[in-house]
Amino acid sequence: MGTWSTAGFGNDEALDWLAELQEADDALAFIRETLDSGSTEGTVAAAEVLALLAGHNSADAHPDAVDWCAGKAAPPADLRHAAADALQAILDDPDADGHDTWAELGEDDEDYLAWLANLKSLQVRLRG
């Protein structure tokens, strides 16, 4: 498993998702499909990109995501809200990937709490 950070792009799956987004013919359709897929890492990455597109940067935003988003139009509010709702579904489901990731890595509660805080902060950025 390639997870090294609680940030949105702190794992291999999210970085793979970003590469696929960069190749997508219709980025917003690709993001919608991701949100519908239920993939935790993909959903978090998509939400991060939507927040960046909306002008809500974060200190740990991946530079490749920031570069890709630069100069692109803000996403529609309904898509940002759908991403915030998808993040809430992850937060509410203790069986969703991510909740057990930090336990599997043998990390302490601080990392798990940081991951949860990142998701909640991302929700605020999406609704802002």
Image (spheres, rainbow, N blue to C red):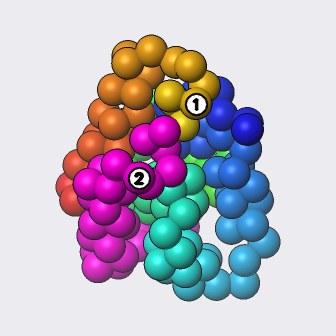
Image quadrant where residue 114 sits: top left
- Which class describes the residues within 10 Å of circle 2: few (<14), some (14-19), or many (20+)? few
Say if residue 119 shows up in the picture. yes
Q: Which residue appears at 68% of the width and 60% of the height?
A: 17
> What span is in magenta?
72-100
Relative to 22, 93 lies left or right = left
User: Does residue 107 show up magenta in the picture?
Assistant: no
User: Does residue 90 show up magenta in the picture?
Assistant: yes
Quarter the N terminus occupies: top right
Residue 104 tag number: 1
Residue 80 x %, y %: 33, 68
Q: Which residue appears at 44% of the width and 54% of the height?
A: 96
Q: Which residue appears at 60% of the width and 78% of the height?
A: 30
**Residue type marked 2:** Asp
Placement of 111 over or under 20, stated as above or below: above
Image quadrant where residue 34 sits: bottom right
